[in-house]
Every structure is written in C-alpha cells, then in structure tokens.
Image (cartoon, rainbow, N blue to C red):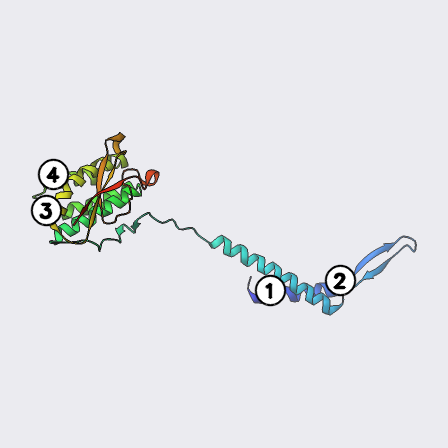
Amino acid sequence: MSWAEIFRLWEVTTIVLEQAEVYRYDSKKNNPQITFKMKKTNMKTGVLALVLLIASCGEKQSNQETQVSTPQSTELNNGNNTDMAEAKFADQMTEKVFNSYQNVRTALIDSDADAVQKAAGKLAVGISKEHEDMLATTTKLADATDIEKQRALFSELTDQVEPILKDAISTGTLYKQFCPMAFQGKGAYWISNREEIRNPYYGQKMLTCGKVTEEIQ
C-alpha cells in the first residue's frame, strides 16, 4: 500500500466516522438516545494509527512472500569450478584437461548427471588423439545418463589422467584422494585441486568420506 493510498483511506474513514453516532435503545423511555460520539481530534488520531498498522502488516507480508531461497551447489558455480589457480602445467592441453576433469568431479559431487555429461563433452574436445583410451572413456562418460555409471567411468578416467598430470605439473599441488567404501568396498581414487575431501563417488551421502594418499607436485 502506497502512502497516497494510506492518506486517502484515512480521509475517507475519518469522514465516515465523523458523521457516525453510536445509539442505544432506552426501553423505559421507549426511544433511542445518543450515548457516544468521538471527539474529532482523537478520532482522526485513532484512524491514522489503524491505517498505518494495516499498511505495515501488508508491507511485512509482501516482503515475506518475495523472499526466495537460492540453492547453492557444493563446489560448482554455473558449471565452472572456480578453484583452479593453485596448480599450473607445462602445456595448455594438460591444463584444459585438468580443468574439465575437475568440473566432472564437481558435478559428480553434486550428483548432477546432466552437468557430468556437459563437462565430459568439453573434456573430450581437449584430449589429443594420442590418448585413445582416455578419449574413449571420456566419450562414454559424456554419453552416460546414469549417475552411478558415470562414477564408474570417472574412476577409470582418473587412472588414465593421473600419469598425464604428474608429467606436466609445473607449480602447485594436486591431491590424490581415496574412498575405501566406493563400489562395494573395492575403493576408488580421484585427483583434486584442494586438500579438503569432497567425495565424488557418494556426493552428499558421504561427502567427506576419504583421505589424501599422495600429494602430486
């Protein structure tokens, strides 16, 4: 409610109440009698207070209705991992592969199969033909729609990408991490650009399950 509407409501209500009188019926004298009439000043003050109270409640309700809760991803920000500056590589191809690999990892943490497919598609574009096995695994990952199938392929991809990252890293640190419970106790590795455990094989179910087994420098 705008202030103009509040003022107009106050004016109209005041005019109506100024002309209103409260009556009671006197049975002994068999006639109605005036018993109460508000003083003009007090009446206007009371009406204004009432209107302001109504307006305040309406504004509060409106504010409550317009508040929206925005869910946030665990590590993903619009499909891009924002924490990639810690490690540098000797060649641009390896850096692109690593960045895309991290986006796949993050999408798995969020259990977002669509995001996994998109990130894997970008990863496949950056892989040279000499790495046929890794390219084949990444292509399967981009085609897979089941999140658990994607996680199994990601484990294979990790084994394939690890030696490439080890050979090309020039500065910074990567963290090889391990979850002993993945795939019914068989266990599985992943490589992260942060020491903090964020498990891509279980996501939110067991987000911090795992340990760092090696620092790659």
Q: Is residue 55 above or below residue 189?
A: below
Q: Is residue 70 above or below residue 5?
A: above
Q: Earlier in the sequence, mark 1 or mark 2?
A: 1
Q: Left of 165 or right of it: where is 51?
A: right
* Element under disc 3: loop
What's the residue type where badge 2 is placed? Ala
Q: Which is nearer the eye, 140 or 35?
A: 140
Q: Which is nearer the eye, 163 or 38?
A: 163
| Residue for badge 2 | 20
Q: Mark 1 to mark 3: distance in Å?
A: 70 Å
* Element under disc 1: helix
Q: Earlier in the sequence, mark 2 or mark 3?
A: 2
Residue 67 visible, this angle = yes
| Residue for badge 4 | 133
What's the residue type where badge 4 is placed? Asp
Q: Disc number at residue 128?
A: 3
Q: Mark 4 to mark 1: distance in Å?
A: 73 Å
What's the residue type where badge 3 is placed? Ser
Q: Mark 4 to mark 2: distance in Å?
A: 91 Å
